[in-house]
Image (cartoon, rainbow, N blue to C red):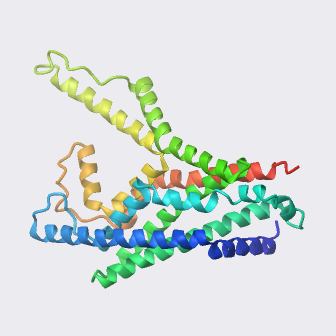
Amino acid sequence: MDLARLAIISQKEFSDHIRSRRLILILIIFCLILGIKAANGVADYNESLEAYKSGTGSLVIFLPSAVEVFSEIVNAIGSEGFGLIVGLALGFDLLSGDKEGRTLKTILSRPIYRDELINGKAIGGIAALILISATGFFIVLAVMLVLGIVPDFDELFGIGILWIITLLFMITAFSLALMTSVITKTSSNSLILSLAIIFLILFVLPLGVNNIATELLIGQPPLHSSDSFSSGMYEYQEKQKEYYDEKNAIIDLSTSISIKEVYEDITLPIVAPSSYQISMNLRNSNDPYGSATSEKPGVWSLVSDQFGKVIIFIMWPVIFFGIAYIRFMRLDLR
């Protein structure tokens, strides 16, 4: 693989994305949605700040930070699936479009290797995603500054971490679309297949793994015995706690398959540390509001708590691109 040719292909792909009406439309919609969600996030931030100062908000145990403005944005990109749509829209016809237009043979008849072509298309698409996501986040920062919210260095660091995680989320969808673009012969089939795989990963597999693993490994919850109010009460409570600890571990395993769930799990501690701390306390059977007087954890410590899920999150685009790469290198163009 020649790096000079790879750079030329990547630059051409990026230029094609920049000049396309599709990217301009996506960029406009992305910035509009993020701007609207940022305004809602600012309103929520101000309400949380007032509740914290007055001491009337039982769900606000830490001083709200400017990063929490991005809570609505995280919901739009993850829960509402907007980040997946952007990634799929940029990648579903990268190679299937060349197949339909019968230009792939012509491109590869030149002194270009296949690995240079697919890597160049991937780099050009990722560069376009960087442009879209960075522009959207700058718009949000501008809205925050206009509304009088000035983040400090730590908060800017948290926003940067959020941007990187969001970019990885969109790259995952892009890699999936690139894979289906290599596998299928038409762009329409590529889009259908990518949507089907997204549905499978987001809903079917997590639910199936959860139900099957629960049934095979731990079975039904312990029964409430007749002597549970006397000598057997303590034993029953211990069995119940053990059962639900194992069930929570299975839930964590099953949700790690869903890229949307992993994205939300990673970003929740950053954009909503109070809610995250309360949920962790409840899960550990502690007083949910017992951390009201404790020190607020830093952004890096919150991310490090989810480090295992970060690794899983990076795994998906690597798998999708690996499949696309191997399939394209073996593709019969006759």
Confirm whether residue 152 shows in the render.
no
Name the residue rendered at 44%, 43% in the picture. 255
Q: Quadrant of the N terminus?
A: bottom right
Q: How many marks?
A: 0
Q: Considering only vertical position in the picture, is 196 above or below 294?
A: above
The image position of residue 194, as x and y in percent, is 59, 49
Q: Considering only vertical position in the picture, is 47 above or below 174?
A: below
Confirm whether residue 162 shows in the render.
yes
Name the residue rendered at 15%, 71% in the picture. 50
Judging depth in this view, the residue of 65 and 294 nearest the camera is: 65
242 sits to left or right of 289? right
Q: Considering only vertical position in the picture, is 185 above or below 298?
A: above
200 sits to left or right of 286? right
The image position of residue 156, as x and y in percent, is 39, 76
Name the residue rendered at 67%, 73% in the picture. 14
Judging depth in this view, the residue of 224 and 202 nearest the camera is: 202
The image position of residue 115, as x and y in percent, is 78, 60
Residue 295 location, quadrant: bottom left
The image position of residue 227, as x and y in percent, is 14, 16
Q: Considering only vertical position in the picture, is 232 above or below 210?
A: above
Q: Residue furthest top?
A: 226
